[in-house]
Image (tube, grey):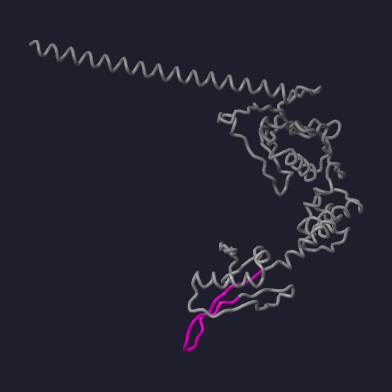
């Protein structure tokens, strides 16, 4: 075997050895990366669970140890995608079928309370709020039932999150729902009252009983109807307070500007300024005949109009040109 052949064989062996070493190195790097990711995720989850225990159930005297109870890791790190995969609350037409899921996000505390109220009414459960403040809100069922839902406010955010719950009821259904407020009922009956503002109170009572199997008194039905009407039409006091705004809207100074061709042997164009009175009648203010409708002709026309109507008054007028509201950026003082 020649020297050149020996060198070629040695080079081939060396290349194969380098390739094998590189493949082994790449496999080791992949394995180390996977192990590091697993350790980081495990550490983040454990840290989140510690936060739940500390912030969510720290002040609870009655702990729940059951398969119906779940805890969710809470994190305020917006950059961590692991903690941004939470469902957002969406109301259902029949809240009896609502599935309580730990980690669900709510826009604010009122959204969580509305969710609990809707669920209580549709499912016929005697749920009430045992704790409700600016940072936490806990809904529990009547005595003897283990059902509960605990929600708290996220740090540096306005949103709230469901951190723990027990979804199974061990109680019988109720016909009197304490948290079913007149405000919630007014929203539920808003469409019906809007279609028939003169609806009778007994019709609302029958509707509530047939739809949710709940009892509604005449007094509460009257409050529900009045709150719905106030939301639809506005309160009488608010309308009287805005009477000056209505008057200003009806009596606002407005001048319409327009031009048209004059079909005569001499030609030219007619520039007009007209106004409206409170009776929606059109009144002519001024007109002029010019050679053509140009910026200079309109400027001359408006300057003469300012001299006649006084600049300080016309400055606050609203001008309409060609049936479109526009603002004329002309220096009327020059």
Spot occupied by residue 218 in the image (x, y as percentages of width and height): 91, 54
Q: Which residues are magenta?
A: 254-272
Q: Is residue 248 magenta?
A: no
Where 252 falls versus 100 (above or below)? below
Res 266 seen here? yes
Residue shown at the point (51%, 80%) measured from the top left? 269
Examine the rendered structure and indicate whether residue 174 appears above or below residue 309: above
Task: Name the one closer to the observer, 37 or 142.
Answer: 37
Task: Quadrant for residue 152, please give it.
Answer: top right
Q: Is residue 90 left or right of residue 134?
A: left
Let me know if residue 258 is in the magenta part.
yes
Which x, y percent locates residue 52? 69, 24
Where is residue 220 drawn, in percent x and y?
89, 51
Q: Quadrant of the C terminus?
A: bottom right
Question: Residue 264, image x and y in percent?
Answer: 49, 88
Residue at 80%, 63% (x, y): give it: 196
Whether residue 1 is visible here, answered yes or no, is: no
Q: Is residue 210 left or right of residue 308?
A: right
Q: Quadrant of residue 298?
A: bottom right
Looking at the rendering, which quadrant does residue 222 occupy?
bottom right
Where, quadrant-wise, is the N terminus in this rendering?
Answer: top left
| Residue lying at 41% horizontally and 18% vertically, measured from the top left | 29
Front residue of 128/263: it is 263
């Amino acid at each position: 075997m020649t020297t050149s052949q020996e060198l070629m064989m040695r080079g081939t062996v060396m290349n194969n050895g380098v390739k094998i070493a590189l493949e082994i190195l790449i496999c080791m790097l992949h394995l180390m990366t996977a192990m590091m990711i697993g350790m980081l995720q495990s550490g983040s989850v454990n840290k989140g669970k510690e936060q739940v225990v500390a912030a969510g159930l720290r002040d609870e005297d009655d702990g729940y140890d059951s398969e119906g109870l779940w805890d969710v890791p809470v994190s305020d790190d917006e950059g961590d995608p692991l903690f941004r995969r939470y469902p957002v609350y969406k109301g259902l037409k029949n809240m009896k079928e609502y599935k309580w899921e730990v980690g669900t996000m709510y826009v604010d505390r009122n959204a969580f309370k509305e969710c609990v109220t809707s669920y209580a009414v549709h499912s016929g459960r005697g749920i009430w709020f045992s704790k409700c403040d600016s940072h936490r809100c806990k809904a529990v069922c009547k005595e003897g039932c283990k059902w509960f839902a605990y929600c708290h406010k996220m740090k540096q955010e306005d949103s709230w999150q469901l951190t723990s719950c027990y979804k199974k009821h061990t109680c019988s259904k109720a016909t009197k729902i304490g948290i079913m407020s007149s405000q919630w009922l007014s929203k539920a009956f808003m469409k019906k009252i809007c279609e028939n503002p003169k609806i009778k109170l007994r019709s609302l009572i029958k509707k509530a009983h047939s739809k949710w199997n709940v009892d509604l008194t005449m007094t509460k039905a009257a409050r529900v109807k009045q709150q719905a009407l106030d939301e639809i039409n506005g309160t009488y006091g608010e309308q009287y307070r805005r009477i000056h705004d209505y008057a200003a809207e009806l009596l606002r100074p407005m001048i319409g500007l327009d031009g048209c061709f004059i079909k005569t042997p001499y030609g030219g164009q007619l520039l007009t300024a007209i106004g409206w009175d409170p009776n929606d009648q059109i009144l002519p203010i001024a007109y002029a005949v010019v050679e053509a409708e140009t910026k200079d002709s309109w400027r001359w026309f408006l300057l003469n109009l300012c001299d006649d109507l006084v600049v300080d008054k016309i400055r606050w007028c609203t001008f309409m040109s060609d049936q479109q509201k526009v603002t004329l950026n002309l220096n009327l003082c020059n």
